[in-house]
Amino acid sequence: MTAKSDGRLDVDKTSGTAQQPGIIFLAMQELFERIGERKDDKDTEVSLSYLEIYNETIRDLLVPGGGKGGLMLREDANQSVSVAGLSSHNPQNVRILSYIGRTGLTSPGPRSDGHDRERQ
């Protein structure tokens, strides 16, 4: 599953609030519910990465600092594109996303042009 969101990075697209979860949280909640329904038939592993592309700079939003200096796109001999240095996490349930939201790791940081993003 890939979730893409254009525009301002804000609480609606990320973890949201306890009363109004964000779209990414809701999508992951649905994913884990479906995995749970099929746990007797299938073994499933979830891999999670979360990145931002802003002014041609790629940042990892699941590590403090976002990958200082920006991350780079790489293409292998099979023309498969990946982001070098992007962290990958294996959450066992949707609760870890609540933790990530509360710890601020997905909160927007200062932009490379010196302006702060809007925070809620």
Image (spheres, rainbow, N blue to C red):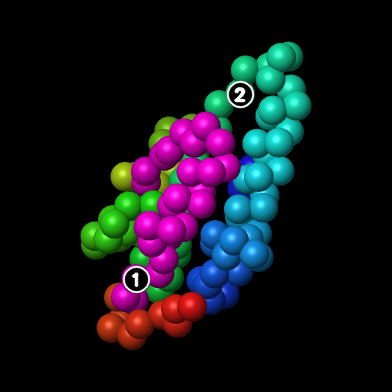
The residue located at (62%, 17%) in the rendering is: 43
User: What numbered label is drawn on residue 86?
Assistant: none
Query: Could you tell whether 13 is left or right of 84 in the image?
Result: right
Q: Is residue 7 highlighted in magenta? A: no
Q: Which residues are magenta?
A: 86-111
Q: Is residue 22 above or below residue 30?
A: below
Q: Please say if 19 is above or below 100.
A: below
Tell me the amino acid under the disc marked 1: Gly
Which residue is labeled 1 in the image?
109
Q: Residue furthest top?
A: 41
What is the x, y in percent for residue 75?
42, 42
The x, y position of residue 101, in whole percent, is 46, 57
Q: Is residue 67 left or right of residue 78?
A: left
**Circle 1: is it few (<14), some (14-19), or many (20+) Cα within 10 Å?**
some
Residue linked to disc 2: 44
Residue furthest toward the left? 68
- Numbered disc 1: secondary structure: loop
User: What residue type is disc 2 on?
Assistant: Thr
Task: Give the residue displayed 57% in from the left and 75% down from the top.
Answer: 7
Residue 108 falls within the magenta-colored stretch: yes
Kindly state the secondary structure of the residue where label 2 is placed.
loop
Q: Residue at x 43, y 52 (%)?
A: 100
Q: Quadrant of residue 84?
A: top left
The residue that appears at 66% across and 45% down in the rendered structure is 29
